[in-house]
């Protein structure tokens, strides 16, 4: 499988209020890692709650985000499969 970052010249996954697109077309695990790391660094977070939805690619993306968060020096609290309400609670 070809990953987005092999052909990506412009980041198209950033929208006005979120990150979205087709996996391996607009973003991939490498971009998810960079997002996790950047968010943790930007907010100088000590702890970050992470969860994911039921899509097949979600565990891979969540793992990449968590690696980025941890590599920035922050801690991760993984709540696993979760809806928006659980994320807000976390």
Image: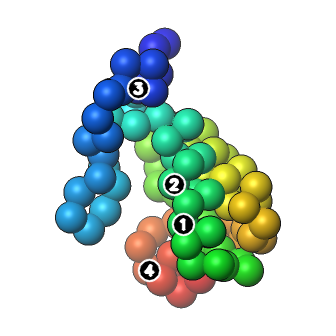
The residues tagged by marks 3 and 2 sit, at their Cα atoms, a distance apart of 15 Å
Mark 2 lies on a secondary structure that is helix
Local packing at callout 4 (Cα closer than 10 Å; few below 14, some 14-19, many 20+) is few
> Outermost residue toward the top?
1
Image x and y of residue 46, in percent: 73, 80
Mark 3: secondary structure:
helix
Along the polypeptide, which appears first: circle 4 or circle 1? 1
Horizontal side, residue 14 vs residue 5: left or right: left
Q: Earlier in the sequence, mark 3 or mark 4?
A: 3
Between 74 and 77, which is closer to the camera in this rendering?
74
Say which label, 1 or 3, has the lower sequence index: 3
**Left or right, 2 with reference to 10:** right
Vertical comparison of 16 with 28: above or below: below
Q: Position of residue 85 (x, y in %)?
A: 44, 80
- Relative to 83, is 39 on the left or the right? right
65 up-or-down from 79: above or below: above
Give the foreground label among 3 and 4: 3
Residue that label 3 marks: 4
Quadrant where the C terminus sits is bottom right
Pair 2/4: label in front: 2
Q: CA distance from mark 2 to mark 4?
A: 22 Å
From the viewer's side, name the closer residue of 83 and 72: 72
Q: Are marks 1 and 2 in contact (CB under 8 Å)?
A: yes
Q: Which mark is residue 39?
A: 1
- Asked whether the viewer can see residue 32, the reply is yes
Write down the residue under mark 2.
35
Residue at numbered disc 4: 85
Between the residue at mark 4 and the residue at mark 1, the CA separation in whole angstroms equals 21 Å
């Amino acid at each position: 499988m070809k990953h987005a970052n092999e052909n990506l010249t412009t980041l198209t996954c950033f929208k006005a209020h979120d990150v979205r697109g087709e996996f391996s077309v607009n973003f991939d695990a490498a971009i998810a890692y960079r997002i996790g790391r950047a968010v943790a660094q930007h907010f100088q977070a000590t702890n970050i709650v992470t969860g994911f939805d039921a899509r097949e690619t979600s565990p891979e993306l969540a793992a990449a985000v968590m690696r980025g968060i941890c590599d920035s020096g922050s801690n991760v609290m993984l709540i696993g499969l979760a809806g928006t309400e659980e994320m807000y609670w976390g």
